[in-house]
Image (tube, rainbow, N blue to C red):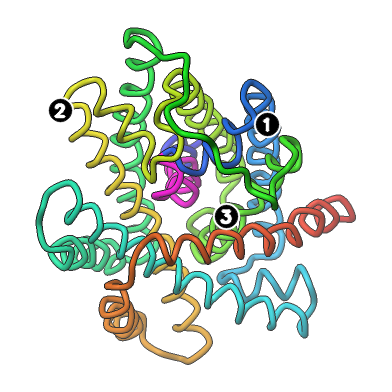
């Protein structure tokens, strides 16, 4: 058994899901801690789904020998509906990559008082390095950066949970989301919201993850996502005054001291970086197969298109794109289970 493959696949799964919304604590707040203690039960339900669906995705891809998400969708839904899903997911991936790069610019402007374009261009440069080496580059950068994110994110959250003085009264009222009224449905919607991106990243990596150890890696990646979410949720529950903040975990980290706040901002940027790399690689892989473009030309074309659009306000993009991912993913969960069980 190749432990390196297990680790790389698990790290790629975490990297695909743990974007800016996850690391910032905003997703955990909206989908889980808004329900108080019941939110922890919701995270446990999500963890089971992440782990089982991760195994199923890799198992189906291994059976079908797919090398792109377009092929995977056609096997799931048939040629006609698969093509329609292909177009919609490609659009969502493009907007998602733009959102992550826009978020990187917002981080540099808000926390470092630098030009947002410095953050966008630096992020684009690192993305181009990772994409230059294709699937191996994506797996390598995830295996390098995910442990860094894990250590800082879990470390700061545990520090807040164990040693910081918590508060009892919320400083700001929570804004209820009319689309998420139940903690159990919220846990399912959260998985569906993140599943689409993980699915296309795995499908685009093709043979890189279609080894027997790949399914084990996806399973453990799902468990790791649950661990991340529980620790962040406990930290947010201990500091209810951060409710309503756009980036609540940075507020938690900042309450521990300036250095912890700075470190968490770096973690947030790394989360945006790995999510953007996953989106970009999937799109380039798709462009290469659909339009017969050479891989490196497709990469350059994609960056030329994305960089100018990354000046759009980060919060505006996130507000519109995240619900689309969630409701699109609701289609995939039952179809994945059915496709796997019937074979």
Q: Going 73% across and 57% down the picture, which residue do you hit?
A: 330
Q: Quadrant of residue 78?
A: bottom right
Considering every residue shown, the one lying at the far right of the view is 342
Residue 245, relative to residue 275: is it above or below?
A: above
For mark 1, give the secondary structure.
Answer: helix
Q: Which residues are magenta?
A: 8-24
| Magenta stretch: includes residue 228 | no
Among numbered discs 2 and 1, the one appearing first in the sequence: 1
Residue at 71%, 59% (x, y): give it.
63
Q: Please, is residue 75 above or below residue 54 in the view?
A: below
Q: Residues within 10 Å of mark 3 (few under 14, many from 20)?
A: many
In-image side of 66 versus 102 (left or right): right
Q: Which mark is residue 210?
A: 3
Q: Earlier in the sequence, mark 1 or mark 3?
A: 1
The percent position of residue 298, horizontal first and vertical second, equals 35, 83
Q: Disc 2 on helix, strand or loop?
A: helix
Q: Nearer the viewer, residue 299 or 308?
A: 308
Q: Main secondary structure of the magenta part?
A: helix
Residue highlighted by disc 2: 258
Instruction: Assign the C terminus to one quadrant of the image.
Output: bottom right
Label 2 – label 3 distance at C-alpha: 44 Å
For marks 2 and 3 on the same chain, the one whose residue lies earlier in the sequence:
3
Foreground: disc 2 or disc 3: 2
Residue plotted at (57% across, 30% down): 33
Residue at image location 46% in from the left, 42% down from the top? 26
Q: Nearer the viewer, residue 73 or 209?
A: 73
Q: CA distance from mark 1 to mark 3?
A: 30 Å
Query: Does residue 12 belong to the magenta stretch?
Result: yes
Residue 24: x and y in percent read: 38, 41
């Amino acid at each position: 058994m190749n432990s390196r493959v297990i680790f790389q696949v698990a790290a790629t799964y975490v990297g695909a899901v743990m974007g800016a919304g996850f690391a910032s604590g905003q997703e955990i707040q909206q989908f889980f801690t808004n329900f108080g203690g019941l939110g922890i039960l919701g995270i446990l339900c999500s963890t089971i789904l992440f782990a089982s669906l991760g195994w199923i995705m890799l198992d189906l891809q291994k059976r079908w020998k797919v090398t792109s998400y377009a092929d995977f969708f056609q096997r799931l839904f048939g040629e006609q509906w698969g093509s329609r899903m292909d177009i919609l997911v490609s659009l969502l991936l493009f907007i998602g990559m733009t959102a992550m790069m826009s978020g990187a610019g917002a981080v540099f402007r808000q926390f470092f008082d630098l030009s947002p374009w410095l953050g966008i261009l630096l992020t684009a440069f690192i993305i181009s390095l990772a994409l230059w080496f294709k699937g191996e580059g994506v797996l390598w950068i995830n295996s390098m950066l995910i442990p860094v994110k894990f250590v800082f994110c879990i470390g700061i959250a545990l520090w807040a949970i164990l040693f910081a003085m918590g508060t009892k009264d919320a400083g700001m009222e929570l804004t209820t989301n009319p689309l998420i009224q139940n903690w159990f449905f919220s846990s399912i919607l959260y998985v569906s919201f993140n599943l689409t991106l993980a699915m296309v990243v795995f499908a685009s990596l093709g043979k890189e993850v279609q080894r027997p150890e790949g399914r084990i890696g996806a399973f453990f990646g799902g468990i790791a996502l649950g661990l991340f979410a529980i620790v962040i949720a406990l930290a947010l529950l201990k500091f209810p005054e951060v409710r309503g903040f756009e980036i609540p975990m940075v507020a938690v980290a900042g309450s521990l001291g300036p250095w912890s706040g700075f470190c968490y901002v770096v973690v947030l940027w790394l989360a945006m970086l790995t999510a953007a790399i996953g989106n970009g690689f999937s799109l380039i892989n798709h462009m290469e197969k659909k339009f017969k473009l050479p891989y490196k030309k497709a990469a350059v074309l994609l960056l030329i298109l994305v960089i100018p659009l990354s000046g759009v306000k980060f919060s505006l993009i996130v507000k519109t794109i995240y619900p689309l991912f969630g409701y699109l993913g609701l289609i995939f969960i039952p179809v994945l289970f059915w496709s796997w069980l019937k074979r």
